[in-house]
Image: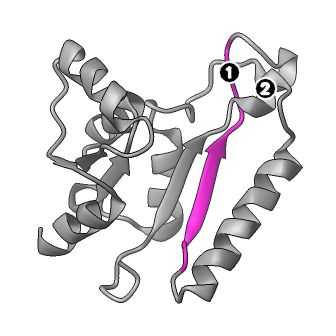
Amino acid sequence: LNDAGFLVVVVTNQSGVARGYFTEDDVAKVNDKMFFDLNVAGAFVDAVYYCPHHTDFGGEKYGIDCNCRKPKVGMVVKAQEEFEIDINESFVVGDHKGDIELGKNAGAKTVHVLTGHGVEESKKLEEAGIVPDCTSDDLLSAIQYILKA
């Protein structure tokens, strides 16, 4: 994707912060490790946006009904503003129902991957009547689809 000129932006819910499982510093350390590993492989992520909130946990600081928690579009809007992204020409790839809902809510094309939680989340998508633009076996096949689209 980098070589093809795509921006690569990660948007992720990290309610573990609100739940007290880990801190925002821990999230930053994981992101740094991801950046390092990708760099070693000759790739990079342009930006990471994360939502530490959850309405049921986290008190005043994190226990809020924010606009950034997927499937709401706050993180996508922030990326659009910072990078001047044309969302209609963009793809949201994910293994959760909320990822595909996010893409639909934002107006992007959606790719559901069956790795991770993808298989069990497929059932939730079907029950909700949400149809991704593409379903891929894994991230590599999702990227191949995007490059051909």
Q: Residue at x 34, y 84 (%)?
A: 5
Q: Earlier in the sequence, mark 1 or mark 2?
A: 2
Look at the numbered discs 1 and 2 and tell me whether their residues touch, using CB distance below 8 Å: yes
Q: Secondary structure at mark 2?
A: helix
Tag 2: Cα neighbours inside 10 Å, few (<14), some, or many (≥20)? many
Q: Which residue is mark 1?
A: 54
Give the x, y percent position of residue 119: 31, 33
Q: Which residue is mark 2?
A: 18
Q: Amino acid at mark 1?
A: His
Query: Which quadrant of the rendered structure holds the N terminus?
Result: bottom left
- Compared with 33, 68 (above or below) is above
Q: In the rendered structure, find residue 67 and report the number of the disc placed on it.
A: none
Whole-number angstrom distance, CA of label 1 to CA of label 2: 6 Å
Q: Would residue 88 appear left or right of 10 to someone viewing this image?
A: left
Which quadrant of the view contains residue 142? bottom left
Q: How is the image coloured?
A: one colour
Q: Secondary structure at mark 1?
A: loop
Q: How many marks?
A: 2
Q: Would residue 147 appear left or right of 95 to someone viewing this image?
A: left
Give the x, y percent position of residue 140: 31, 66
Q: Amino acid at mark 2?
A: Ala
Give the x, y percent position of residue 3: 36, 89
Q: Would residue 41 appear left or right of 133 to someone viewing this image?
A: right
Q: Residue at x 35, y 60 (%)?
A: 139
Which quadrant of the view contains residue 30? bottom right
Q: Residue at x 21, y 66 (%)?
A: 146
The stretch in magenta equals 44-55
